[in-house]
Amino acid sequence: MSAEFLWYIPNQVTPGHRGDTVTTDHNSLETLTAQALALEEYGWKGALLGTGWGRPDTLTVATALAARTRSFEPLIAIRPGYWRPAHFASATATLDHLSGGRVRINIVSGKDDLAAYGESEEDQATRYGRTEEFIRLVRRLWTEQNVTHHGTHYRVSDSTVRPRISARADRPHPTLYFGGASAAAERVAATVADVQLFWGEPLADVRERIERLRDLSERHGRELPPLEFGLRVTTVVRDTTEQAWADAQERVAEMAKSQAKSQNSPRRAAVGQQRLYDLAARGDVLDDNLYTAPGRVGGGGAGSTWLVGSAQDVGKALRKYQDLGITHFVLSDTPYLQEIHRQGEQLLPLLR
C-alpha cells in the first residue's frame, strides 16, 4: 500500500517545545515558512499544526503557510466547540479553494480551556456525540447545498457554503483525521472519520485496534469509503544506531531532571494518553526500537514514545506499521528545522 509522510510544525507561543531551539522568533511567519519550505524541498506531503486555547489559531497559521508554499498541505487541528460547523465549513472551503485543494483537517475532541471561549464542560458521551454531529454536518455542508439540519447540538437551515469544495480524484473534500482510544472515540472514528490517527504504540496493539475499528465500521454500518489509519510518532534518527540511543537516553535523563524540579501534580490523562503511559510498565523498549521511557518522565502526546535508531532502523519499524495497514504517517523530532533536513535526507528516501 502506498503511504503519505507528513511532519509536525510547532504552533506554540512559548519557545523550546519538546527540545526545539529557543529563539525569540520561533513562531514568526519567517521561521514557520522556513520549515514549510524545507518540507517541500525534501518531498514531505505537509505538516500537522497543533491546536489549543492559548496557541496561535491553526487556520490562520495554515492560511499564511499555504500562501507562501506551492505543494505544502497543512493538516489543521481544530476543536468542535471552538468552531461552529457552518462557520468552519465556510472558512476551510475558502482556504481549500485558494490553496488549490491542499487542506487537511484533524478533529480533536479532547478537553481544552473551554470556559475561555464560552463553552462548558461536558461528559465524554456528550462530547463525542457533539463531535460526531459536527463531522457529519461539516461533510454535508462541503458536499451538499441548501442543507437543513436540526440536531442535538447544531441547527442550520437552507445553508450553502461558498465557494464550493472542488472534488478531486483522490478526495471529495478535505480529508478528516481523528484520534482517540476510548470506546466513544473509536465509534466516532469507525462511522464518520476518514483517517484514524494512532500514537506510537507497539505493533501488536496497533494491529488489535485496526481490527477492532474495522469490525466497528461493519457493525455500525459505515456508509463512507473504508476507514484509513495513520501514525503520529516521534522519530529519533541519527547516523548510527548507537548514537541514536545515546542521544535518546541523554534526553530522557534531562527530562527526568526537569520533572523532578517541577514537582508536578499527578497527571489526569485521556484514555489514549494513559495507554502510552502504561507502556512503560512493559519495558523501556518494546518491539525493536519503540522507546517508552519518555512517557515516564514527562513526555506527552506524540512525545510519549519514540522510534529510535539509524534511518535504516526507523525505516524498518515504520514499514512494519505500514504492513499492518497504516498509510498516513506524521513524524517529527526536535530541533524541528534541523530534523526536517536530517530525516528528509536520511529517512524519507528509504520510506519511498
Image (cartoon, rainbow, N blue to C red):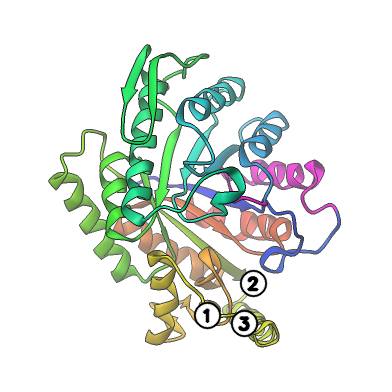
Mark 3: secondary structure: helix
Residue 208 picture location, percent across and down: 24, 64
Q: Residue at x 20, y 39 (%)?
A: 222
Judged from this view, the residue extending furthest toward the left is 219
Tag 2 and tag 1, C-beta contact below 8 Å: no
Residue 205 picture location, percent across and down: 30, 69
| 64 versus 111 height, above or below | above
Query: How many numbered discs sit on the rendered protein?
Result: 3
Label 3 belongs to which residue?
252
Tag 2 and tag 3, C-beta contact below 8 Å: no
User: Which one is nearer the viewer's eye here, 320 or 271?
Assistant: 271
Label 1 belongs to which residue?
266
Q: Amino acid at mark 3?
A: Val
Tell me the magenta residue range.
25-54
Mark 1: secondary structure: loop
* Residue 238: quadrant of the picture: bottom right
* Residue 251: quadrant of the picture: bottom right
213 horizontally vs 85: left or right: left
Q: Amino acid at mark 2?
A: Asp
Residue 299 picture location, percent across and down: 57, 73
153 horizontally vs 50: left or right: left
Q: CA distance from mark 1 to mark 3?
A: 19 Å
> Tag 3 or tag 1, which sits nearer the N-term?
3
Q: Is residue 247 magenta?
A: no
User: Which one is nearer the viewer's eye here, 331 or 114?
Assistant: 114
> Tag 3 or tag 2, which sits nearer the N-term?
2
> Tag 1 or tag 2, which sits nearer the N-term?
2
**Marker disc for residue 315:** none
Q: Residue at x 61, y 36 (%)?
A: 59
Label 2 belongs to which residue?
239
User: Which one is nearer the viewer's eye here, 129 or 41?
Assistant: 129
